[in-house]
Amino acid sequence: MIDPHAPAPPGTPPPWRAPARIPVRQATGRFLVLAGVFVCAACGLVYELELVALASYLIGDSVTQASVVLSVMVFAMGIGSLVAKRLRRHAAAAFGAVEATLALVGGGSAMALYAVFAWTGDWGGLCADGPRWLLVAFSLAIGLLIGAEIPLLMELIQRIRRQDAGGAVADLFAADYVGALVGGLAFPFLLLPFLGQLTGALLTGAVNVVAGGVLVLGLFRRDLTCRARRLLLVANLVVLGLLAGAAAHVDDFERAARQAVYGGEVRVAVHTGVQEVVLTGDADGRPLHLFLNGRLRISGHDERRYHQALVRPAMKGPHARVLILGGGDGMAAREVLRHPGVRRVDVVELDAELLRLADRDPALSTLNGRVYDDPRVRVTTADAFRWLREAPAATYDVVISDLPDPGGTASSKLYSQEFYGLASRALDDGGRLAVHAGQAAARPRAFWTVDTTIRAAGLRTSPYSASGVPDAGHESASDWGFVLAAPEFPPPVRPDWPAPTPRITGLPASTLMHPRY
């Protein structure tokens, strides 16, 4: 007679590792589990890329944000894998719960982060000068859940048919890596351009919860108790309903968030292939404001001060041929055309949609004096660095660099020694280069790094600064820093545009391989 309480012989698997009772053949069951691995991996990578993209857009410095998100997430995946070891006894139920939670957290992460940014500003004031802890929290949570998937899926696939651990791991990781490839390609080429960040994340969450629910409730339903099946079904339906409801109201949410971010009525808001462009104001006496990626770029209240300070010093001397790098809004070209003797103005702007708005939007085109109707202005849609590499030497009397502030990874190459070397090559004898160098008072180290970098390219410099005036929409006046450069000594700058002090010396130049901003 066998004692039911006697210990099992050595090597006997525990009861919970008995072969799964699945409603399909073993080969079909294995294929379905691997298909689930594929889908989950694709969704997981989309969540990672979504956090990187949103953080880079709202915070800036894409290298730092990508490093924070990916390193925290990989660390959390390791912790999640360790935690999942304790859940193998209930692998099917645990996997279903993990996928439902991951779908809700990952799918709603973009909307939650954007909401905090929009209504509280600067991530709720959390450590404004350090890591953004809310971003870290989402990266940690998503990483923990993604890390728990593989051990649980490994347990499930082994319960369908036992095989050597090496073969099972190879199959799982092959499906995982291929899924990651598909998710990585789908995000920039499908989800982001056609659905946007918020809807794309919500759709990914819906796919995630459906895949997890179908796999567990369909293939491994016999491993669950009736109560567990009901709870998991309700949880999946609730998550799916929340994601669908959020997707149905995403347009209303974005409008409200823009209202909170930009203040006043948002008149134009477009996501181009390069950036988000928003126009506000120009109604009821409010000045027009142009925002690029959430940052104020043009204020109708004081933009003339900025563009006059940028353009006028460089126009002292020959100025028949002028090149403007950036400046797609047309304001710098307007100031250039105020000077007699200008025969040609070439504008090189990366964002074609910004050029279209500057030409066709009634308020913006009025502010820039309808410069794009002037036959002397010629527009090229191109990357400024790449365009300069192909530009003929000694072509221009004046080069004006009206580009975003230095500091973001995307703009670092446009403030590099190599970039200024190319700009110098485009100058004719006696030519001048004027550079917008960021905030002279608020970010003096970045400003003086620009000056040092231009000097390293073989040019002489005259740094100077100007300021705007505060209005109802700003707590303080704008802070602008500029550098006027030339192969020989540049012309003097007006006394009311003084050089920022004190000069920071000993700074290294910024290069393509060693960005310093």
Image (cartoon, rainbow, N blue to C red):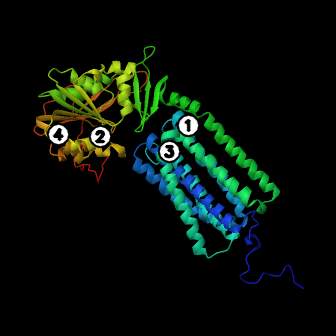
Q: Earlier in the sequence, mark 1 or mark 3?
A: 1
Report, in whole angstroms, how far the alpha carbon at label 4 lies from the one at label 1.
45 Å
Furthest-right residue in view? Answer: 1
Report, in whole angstroms, how far the alpha carbon at label 2 lies from the one at label 4.
28 Å
Q: Residue at x 74, y 71 (%)?
A: 19
Q: Which mark is residue 345?
A: none
Q: Earlier in the sequence, mark 4 or mark 1?
A: 1
Report, in whole angstroms, how far the alpha carbon at label 3 lies from the one at label 4.
39 Å
Q: Residue 16: horizontal and vertical position, in percent? A: 75, 70
Q: Amino acid at mark 2?
A: Pro
Q: Quadrant of residue 327?
A: top left
Residue under pointer 3: 190
Residue under pointer 4: 426
Q: Circle 2 sits in a helix, a strand or a loop, which is it?
A: helix
Q: Circle 1 sits in a helix, a strand or a loop, which is it?
A: helix
Q: Circle 4 sits in a helix, a strand or a loop, which is it?
A: helix
Q: Circle 3 sits in a helix, a strand or a loop, which is it?
A: helix
Q: Amino acid at mark 3?
A: Leu
Query: Comparing marks 2 and 4, which lies closer to the viewer?
Result: 4
Query: Comparing marks 4 and 1, which lies closer to the viewer?
Result: 4
Question: Which one is nearer the viewer's eye here, 186 or 457?
Answer: 186
* Residue 132 visible from this viewpoint: no
Query: Comparing marks 1 and 3, which lies closer to the viewer?
Result: 3
- Callout 1 environment at 10 Å: few (<14), some (14 to 19), or many (20+)? many
Q: Earlier in the sequence, mark 1 or mark 2?
A: 1
Residue under pointer 1: 115
